[in-house]
Image (cartoon, grey):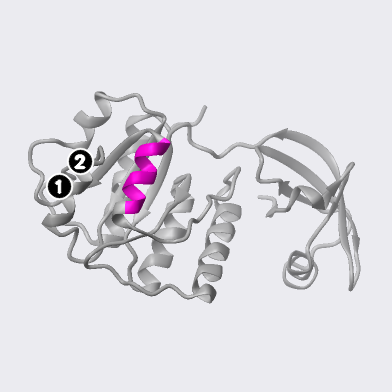
């Protein structure tokens, strides 16, 4: 399988692709690629290109576009994952695996029981994890990663954006995910996942007032880093987004 690289639109001039310094290092020094070999380039705007490498020097790596097509790898259902902040390794795992799965955007939240601090360096690392996972998994776009918000603010933003707002909650027993999806054809689903220990009960009533629906994911209690990926997988399956074609 050809290696995949996201580039900025400005890196594509006519039929020529100019790779960034970091990408040039990876192509030349890590992957040991040579002129005449092909890679896949994506512009993060639904376009995908087959590119033959034409120049690999110490300072410059360039290629020529030999084929253009619409990018694949994006689900029809747009899932925005509002994951409560977790310990660093667990949150990074959610970002990586969520990107591989097909989550369209990440919008971290701060809730009553969640981790609070996010440094600028950490946010940059998270963005890099998402970009690398998108390349590795064959995505057509890099899922955007928003700055973290308070739960109440994030719910209001989701309500204004439109779509189905779901909160898996361990105390919900009446409404399950399958029933809720069957009653809605919303193309965008905002999925709110609590921290370790879950959402506090006093956070649920205001969330419902902002249009959120609480659902059960079954009789077993899932970890905070697992629940969102399980729910997203089930949503994509029910909507037919895990099938080819």
For the point 35% across and 24% down, the residue is: 185
Q: Is residue 152 left or right of residue 129?
A: left
Q: Is residue 172 left or right of residue 104?
A: left
For the point 25% across and 37% down, the residue is: 211
Specify the segment rendered in magenta: 153-161
Percent position of residue 195, x then y: 25, 63
Q: CA distance from mark 1 to mark 2?
A: 6 Å
Residues 6 and 83: in front is 83
Element at label 2? helix
CB atoms of marks 1 and 2 within 8 Å: yes
For the point 32% across and 31% down, the residue is: 238
Give the residue at mark 2. 209
Q: Is residue 221 left or right of residue 240?
A: left
**Circle 1 crowding by C-alpha within 10 Å: few under 14, some 14–19, many from 20:** few
Residues 141 and 200: in front is 200
Q: Main secondary structure of the magenta part?
A: helix
Give the residue at mark 1. 205
For the point 18% across and 41% down, the residue is: 215
On screen, residue 102 above or below 84: above
Q: How many marks?
A: 2
Residues 35 and 228: in front is 228
Percent position of residue 136, x then y: 58, 55
Percent position of residue 207, x then y: 22, 46
Element at label 1? helix
Q: Is residue 172 left or right of residue 213?
A: left
């Amino acid at each position: 399988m050809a290696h995949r690289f996201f580039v900025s639109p400005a890196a594509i001039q006519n039929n020529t692709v100019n790779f960034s310094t970091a990408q040039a290092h990876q192509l030349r020094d890590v992957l040991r690629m040579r002129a005449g070999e092909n890679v896949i380039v994506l512009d993060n705007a639904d376009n995908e290109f087959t590119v033959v490498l034409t120049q690999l020097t110490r300072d410059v790596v360039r290629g020529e576009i030999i084929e253009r097509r619409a990018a694949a790898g994006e689900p029809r259902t747009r899932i925005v994952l509002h994951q409560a902040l977790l310990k660093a390794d667990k949150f990074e795992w959610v970002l990586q695996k969520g990107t591989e799965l097909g989550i369209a955007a990440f919008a971290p939240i701060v809730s009553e029981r969640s981790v609070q601090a996010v440094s600028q360096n950490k946010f940059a690392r998270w963005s890099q994890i998402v970009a690398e996972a998108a390349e590795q998994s064959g995505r057509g776009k890099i899922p955007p990663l928003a700055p973290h918000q308070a739960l109440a603010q994030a719910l209001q933003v989701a309500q204004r954006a439109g779509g189905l707002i779901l909160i898996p909650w361990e105390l919900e027993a009446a409404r399950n995910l399958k029933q809720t999806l069957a009653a809605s054809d919303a193309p965008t689903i905002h999925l709110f996942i609590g921290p370790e220990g879950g959402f506090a009960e006093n956070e649920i009533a205001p969330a419902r007032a902002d249009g959120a629906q609480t659902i059960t994911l079954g009789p077993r209690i899932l970890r905070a880093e697992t629940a969102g990926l399980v729910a997203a997988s089930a949503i994509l399956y029910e909507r037919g987004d895990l099938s080819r074609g």
